[in-house]
Amino acid sequence: MSIFQTAEKQSNILPEKYRRMTVLELESRVREIKEKLGKKLFIPGHHYQKDEVIQFADATGDSLKLAQLSEENKDAEYIVFCGVHFMAETADILTTPVQKVLLPDMRAGCSMADMADIHQTERAWAKLVNIFGETMLPLTYVNSTAAIKAFVGRHGGATVTSSNAEKMVSWAFEQRPRILFLPDQHLGRNTAYNLGVGLDEMAVWNPVSDKLEYEGPLENVKVILWKGHCSVHENFTVENVKEVRKQYPEMKIIVHPECKREVVAISDMAGSTNYIIEAIENSKPGSSWAIGTEMNLVNRIINQHPDKHILSLNPHMCPCLTMNRIDLPHLVWCLETIERGEGHNRIQVEEQTAAFAKLALDRMLERP
């Protein structure tokens, strides 16, 4: 390891002084710096963040909404994105070059996004074109790296969210007879199934073995699903659903479409994070719900709706571990570097990558 690599590694280690500070001291510092910087500072916080962080967020939402709010905020010189790396990348792509997007902890990645790197994707595309010719259009979930978004943009495709996936998959089928859906196979499968594509018309690309997993005539393939998943949502099981049905027969089960197809199929409702939040908000007092999504959000919903019986579909579920790397000590550390004029952990997407990634985002955003 070179001296530069050592320095880089050390820069991501939380200084000991922040570990020794009390919660009250940390909270006081956040308030002081926010007041001092005023409109120059914008803190977007993802729904899955801890309450200790989300209490200081200037806006909460999913990754795309927060990136769009960052884009709209022309006053902010510093955007401290309390989420994970790909979310901060999207914010950097959409904001101006003079605005600085910072991530409090550079270790806050996303296991799903990491399941599709650009080298695997380019290699897979070459092999799939050899199989299917120029009949495919790539789509990528916004939960992907800037490099994957740029790849999709270069090849005429677009990004999708869990809210608009059906609309974007329908659009893609208007362009080409087949789609490659990255990087979450479950969202892709659930979306295509809802649009009438049979499970026997979906193949899976395995980036580890570099092979297409499919039994049947290749001409029947309409959707190629990248073999990736959300480490949180994949842990909700059919057994979880059966147990809730057994204990609480009247309880409604609502899950995120990143869950497996068999779980979504036997749940009452499935939709994006915002869909889940709004469904609970609009439900009657006294209603009961089992929610299949990230634990920090489920606990927050439970606390916000004491008039309803709400629980996690999987009682043994852990919060998103990478999202949880953003905590109060790291937030204070990041804010103090801004106060000193340094700006720790800036996220900067290379210009050409940003241009093609924005093209993929724009193709989605221009479809209301």
Image (cartoon, rainbow, N blue to C red):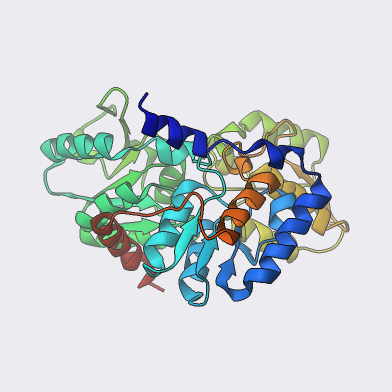
Residue 39 percent location from the top left of the image: 59, 75
* Residue at 64% from the left image edge and 44% from the top image edge: 294
Tell me if residue 253 can be seen: no
| Placement of 271 over or under 122, stated as above or below | below
* Residue at 59% from the left image edge and 52% from the top image edge: 334
Residue 126 percent location from the top left of the image: 15, 38
Frontmost residue, 221 versus 91 = 91
Residue 158 percent location from the top left of the image: 31, 58
* Residue at 65% from the left image edge and 67% from the top image edge: 58
Split into 4 quadrants, where in the image is the C terminus?
bottom left
Q: In the figure, is residue 279 to the left or right of 310?
A: left
Total labels drawn: 0
Frontmost residue, 209 versus 54 = 54
* Residue at 82% from the left image edge and 54% from the top image edge: 303
| Placement of 255 over or under 20, stated as above or below | below
Tell me if residue 139 can be seen: yes
Q: Quadrant of residue 132?
A: top left
Q: In the figure, is residue 85 to the left or right of 121?
A: right
Frontmost residue, 52 versus 357 = 52
Q: Quadrant of residue 173?
A: bottom left
Residue 27 percent location from the top left of the image: 77, 55
Q: In the figure, is residue 81 to the left or right of 94?
A: right
Frontmost residue, 121 versus 332 = 332
Q: In the figure, is residue 323 to the left or right of 284?
A: left
Split into 4 quadrants, where in the image is the N terminus?
top left
